[in-house]
Amino acid sequence: MIGFRASALHTKLRREIWQMRGQVLAIALVIGGGVAVCLMSLVNYSSLQATRAQYYQDHQFADGFVSLKRAPRHVLQRVAQIPGVTRHSGRVEGTAKLEVAGFTDPVSARLVSLPDAGQPEVNRLFLRQGRLPDPARSDEIVVIGSFAEAHGLMPGDGLVAIINGRRQPLRIVGIAESPEFVYVIPPGGMLPDYQRYGVLWLAQEALAAAMDMRGAFNSLVLRVDPAFAVAGVVDALDRELDRYGGTGAFGREDQFSHRFLNDELNQLKTMATVFPLIFMSVAMFLLNVVISRLISTQRDIIAVLKAFGYSNRQIGWHYSQLVMLIALIGLLIGVASGIWLGNGLGELYMEYYRFPALLFRVNVWWVAVLALITFAVALLAGWRAIRQAAMLPPAEAMQPEGPARFRISRIERLLSGVRLSQPSRMIVRQLSRRPGRTLMSVLGIAMATAIVLVGNFQFDSVSLMVHTQFARIQQQDLAVTLTDPASDAVLFGLVRQPGIRYGEGRRTVAVRLVNGHRQWRTALTGIPLDARLQHVVDADLNNVSLPPDGVLLTDFLARELAITTGDLLRVDVLEGDRRTLVIPVAGITSEYLGVGAYMTRQALNRVLGEGPVINQALLNVDAAQAGTIYRELRETPGVMAINIRQAMLDSFYETLARTFLTFTFFNSLLGGIIAFGVIYNTVRISLAEKGRELASLRVLGYSHPEVAHILLGELAILLLLGIPAGWAIGNGLALLIVTAMQTELYRVPLTITAQTLAFSATVVFVSALASGAIAWWRLRGLDLVAVLKTRE
C-alpha cells in the first residue's frame, strides 16, 4: 500500500510538473539565472587566475625589478651573490619613436635587449610567430603581439625607428608576448594604446650600441628563491645598485603590468562574489514567494490526499520533491549557461590580456557546492509553505480558505470620494484586504526591477568616469613626455610651432610615498598654479585650488596610506639625488582613473632643488594641422612619447570598457530573464488563485474584457508600486557593488541616469505585457460549468 501511495504521488508530481510547465520553467529560469551568474563569474576568475599563474611560471616572470643610469656588466656577478637570487638578467632598455607605414599618428616604443644566447633567463618570451633576432644583425626585432595586431604587422615587415636621435630601419623577425608586458601603457598614459605604443626586443649588442651602453646595463630583473623574502632581496639589490643611479628596486607587487592586472583580477573576483550573492538572494526570495502561493492554491488537493490516508510526512516530502525538482531544472539550466557564458567571457578577456592560452577550468566541487546551496535554499524558501501543507487538517483543507475580513479598509475610505467601476472596486478590495500577499507581490516586482537595474547601471558609471577624466580633469589635446627634464624654453619652443594654440608644462617625478608601515610607488606631479589644461577636483567634481605648499592626494591613495589633511607625508624621490622629503598633506582630491599626488610646479621644483624645469608639456592644437604637428614632434629631439587624449579615450572603450561592459551585459541579460520569470509567475499564480471567482463573474454576466480588467488591473497597480521600490532597492545594491569594486586602476562612481531607470522599468513592463497576454488568452479557457458545481 505504501508503494502504491508513493507511486500515486510520483504520478501526481509528474503530471503537475507537466501541467505547470510554463510556471516551472519560469521559476527554473529565476534559479538558473542566479546559478549562471555565480558559475560564470567563478569559472572566469579561476580560469584567468590559473592562466596567469601558469604563464608566470612557464616564462620565469621576475620577482624583482630595478632601473638605473648605467652599471658595468661585471656588477652582475655581485648581484648573483645576493642571498635568495636564483636567476637574474641585466638588460639594456631605451625608448624610440617609430614610423609605421600608413599610420600618421605619433608612435613610440619601449626597447628591451635580448641576450645573445637567445631567450633570457628571466621574463622569457612566448613567440607567437617567427624567431628571435640574430645576435649578428642590428636591424632585427621582435614586436609585441598587441602592437603587431593593431597595425597588421607580420614577420618580414619593416619599421623605421629613431633611437637615441638616430634613424634606423628595422625588420620584424618575430611576434611575441611577455609576462612583463601583459598590460602595456605608454609613459604619461593611463590606459593601453596598442596603435601608438608597443614593445620591441633587439639583440643585446645591437641595442647597447644604439644606446651607447656597450659593456653596461641599465635594467635588471631577477627571480627569488621562495624560501627568501622578496622584500629583503630587493632591499639588498637597492643598496648594491644605488651608486649606479638606481631608481629604487621593487618587487613584483609594484611592477606596473602585474599591479594593474592584479587589480583587474581582484575586481573580477569581487564581481564573482557580489553579483552572484545578489542574484542568488533575489532568486531565492522570489522562489519563496512563488512556491508559497503555488502550494496555497492546492488546499483542496491536499485535503483529498489526507482523506485517502496520506500522512503529514508523505505530503511534506511530496511538496519538497516538487520544490527540489524545480530547483534541479534551474540548476541544470544555470550550470550549462554559466559554463558557456564563462568560456565566452574568458575568450574575450584573452583578447585583452593576451595570455598564450586560456586554461579553462570548471571545478566539480563548485558545481557540487552550488547544487547543495540551490537545493538547501530552495527548500528553505519553500519550507513554511511545505510545513503548512503538511500540517493542514483534512477537514479544514476541504473548505476554501477563510474569507478576508469584510470591512471597509483604510484605502477604500481614502477612495470613497472617487467614482470607481465595480471591477476597479474589486481590485482595490483584493489588494487592501490581503496586505501581506500584496506586499510580497510588490517586493517580487521590486526585486525584479532591482536586478535589471543592477545589471545595467554600470553603463552610466563608466560614462561618468570617462567624462570626468577626459573632459573635466584632462582638457589638453596632446601630452608630450620629454626624455629628460628641460627648462621652460622647450615649452616656449613647442608653443611657437604652427597649429599649437596653447601649452603648459608639468614636472613629474617617480616617488615612494610613505606613512608609517604603509607605502605606495607613484608619480608626484607638479602643475602650474594657473593651470588651464589639467584640473584637480574634489568628490563633488568642483575645482580645487592648488595650495602654494603641501601635497594633494587622491582619495584612493589617501585611504591606502591611512593619511588625511594636515598629516606629514614622507616622500622618497626615486630620481636624481634620491632625496627624502617630508611634506604636509594639504588636501584630498578625487579621481576615477589611476592614483596621483599633486603640488604646484613651483613648489615641486623648489623641494627637488632644481630650477623651473618640466618633463611634460600639455598642448591644445588645431585639429586641422594635427598631422603636421605630429610629424614635427616626431622629429623633435628630446621628445620621448606623445599621448593623444582622444586616442586614450578610444583605447578605453576598445579595451577596459569592452570587457567591463560585456560582463555587465551578461548580468543585465540574466536579470531580464529573472524579471520575466517573476512577473510571469505572479500573473499565473494570481490567475490560479482567482480562477473560480473570475469564472463565477463570467457566469454572472461579466464580459471577458471586464474579467481581464480585474486580473490585469491588479497587476498594473502592483507594477506601479513595485517599480519605484525596485529603483530604491537597486540603488542600494549598486552602492554595495561600487564600494566593493574600488581598485588602483579605476573607481567606479555610483550614478544612475533616468535612461537606466526607464530601461529597468521597461524590461519589467514588457515582461508584464507578455505575461498579461498569456493570462488574457487563458481567461478565455475558464471552465464556466465547473463553478456551477458544489465542491463539498
Image: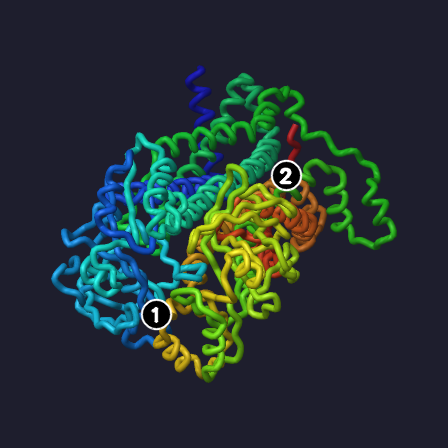
Residue located at (40% from left, 82% from top) = 628
Give x and y (percent) for residue 391.
61, 20
Of tags 2 and 1, the one toward the viewer is 1
Q: Quadrant of residue 46?
A: top left
Pointer 2 residue: 689
Could you tell me which residue is drawn at 37 percent across and 46 percent down? 249
Q: How far apart are the two marked residues, 2 and 1, measured between alpha carbons?
A: 70 Å
Disc 1 marks which amino acid? Val
Does 511 appear above or below 466? Answer: above
Secondary structure type for disc 2: helix
Location of residue 314 with respect to 212 vertically, above or below: above
Secondary structure beneath disc 1?
strand
Q: Position of residue 707 (x, y in %)?
A: 67, 50
* Residue type, mark 2 in image: Glu
Which mark is drawn over residue 107?
A: 1
Q: Residue at x 63, y 54 (%)?
A: 539
From the viewer's side, name the closer residue of 769 and 252.
Answer: 252
Q: Nearer the viewer, residue 129 or 109?
A: 109
